[in-house]
Image (cartoon, rainbow, N blue to C red):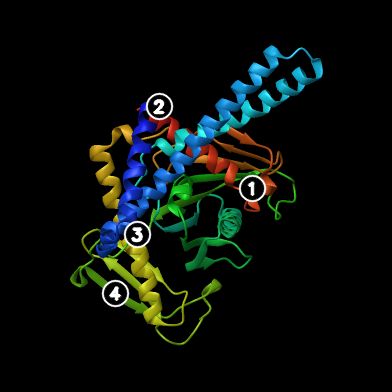
Amino acid sequence: MQDKIAEFRARHSQLEQQIADPDLHKDHDRAIAVMKEHARLSDIVAVADEVDDLTRRIGDNRDLFESETDEEMRRLAETEIEDLERQLDASRRRLRVLLVPPDPLDEKNTIMEIRAGTGGEEAALFAADLYRMYNRYAETMGWKTEVIEANTTEIGGFKEITLSISGKQVYSRLKFESGVHRVQRVPTTESGGRIHTSAVTVAVLPEAEETDVEVKAEELRIDVFRSSGPGGQSVNTTDSAVRITHIPTGLVVSCQDEKSQHKNKAKALRVLKARLFEMEERKRQEEIAEHRRTMVGSGDRSERIRTYNFPQSRLTDHRINLTLYKLEQILAGQLQEVIDALQLQATEEVLKS
């Protein structure tokens, strides 16, 4: 690891010299690439410096502990060593994460699809709970969310809801949320107090940019229809809802969230492109990257990843055997501890491979 860090330090110095050269900024694309690489290496160098500093301070305190005869000073040195070792352990974990080559998709925005599965109305209500959880987590991260399409039930659940989430490293933090989320709780409509099990499917797709995927007009069939709300009631009297079919793959996307047909078409195209991009990316990874699979799962939306048990206030992530007894806080958007654990496990698997 020390040899690799030395290489990064040397490369970091080279990049700083390039950034100081006025000619670099004449080439916009190259300047952006250099700045991105410099930013990543700056994080690595900063944490490596932190590890070196903590290691030095631990050594100084051990020397003091061994040479000091005053018991109170020895106790202070011992306490300081314990505290510094905890900090050093955390810094080394952060450094290991930073040393993993970044996934080119990690900086992308996402399209998130949440769909009620088995469990009827109870599953739809839990889909709404998950939507609120991700929306609150996005708020804490300073991300922007936008509902693209929502199919609601009469008592406030979602049969399905699609939203876009944009900001810094959105896909990096949410990509392990894809899969089946199982809930165990007593529904409000259950008079006997029996626990029901329901399921919701979540898919997190990297949002495609214009250069990522090309969709030709002749490959699309676009239908317009009248929007309708819960229970079939009409939302408006114009044919503003849009359904887009991608003829080569058979993918179908519809959107009726906006009153404008033009806006609904634009939103539906964003979702379609994200799904096509995910299909291509999954195919590419399956062909060339068996070693990039991790223990936290492949992101397959049919894979059961997590259980939310309300009577025990328990969340269990089955991929990494993580159990937390703070379900209320997690559903309120305090998801970072879970996401950190997933990212760390993925990092460890990549480092092993």
216 is higher (above) or lower (below) than 119 = below
Marks 4 & 3, CB-CB < 8 Å contact? no
Please give the residue where the numbered disc 4 appears in the rendered image: 222
Describe the element under mark 3 as helix, strand or loop.
Answer: helix
Please give the residue where the numbered disc 2 appears in the rendered image: 2
Compare marks 1 and 3 and give the one earlier in the sequence: 3
Please give the residue where the numbered disc 1 appears in the rendered image: 330
48 is higher (above) or lower (below) than 43 = above
Real-space Cα separation, disc 2 to disc 1, in angstroms: 38 Å
Residue 295 horizontal/vertical position (percent):
43, 32
Q: Quadrant of residue 269?
A: bottom left
Q: Quadrant of residue 31?
A: bottom left
Compare marks 2 and 1 and give the one earlier in the sequence: 2
Task: In the displayed orientation, state which residue is furthest to the bottom.
Answer: 237
Please tell me the numbered disc located at residue 274: 3
Describe the element under mark 4 as helix, strand or loop.
Answer: strand
Compare marks 1 and 4 and give the one earlier in the sequence: 4
**Which quarter of the rendered picture does the N terminus lie within?**
top left
Type of residue at label 3?
Answer: Ala
Is residue 318 visible in the rendered image? The answer is: no
Residue 22 horizontal/vertical position (percent):
29, 61
Q: Quadrant of residue 55?
A: top right
Real-space Cα separation, disc 4 to disc 2, in angstroms: 57 Å
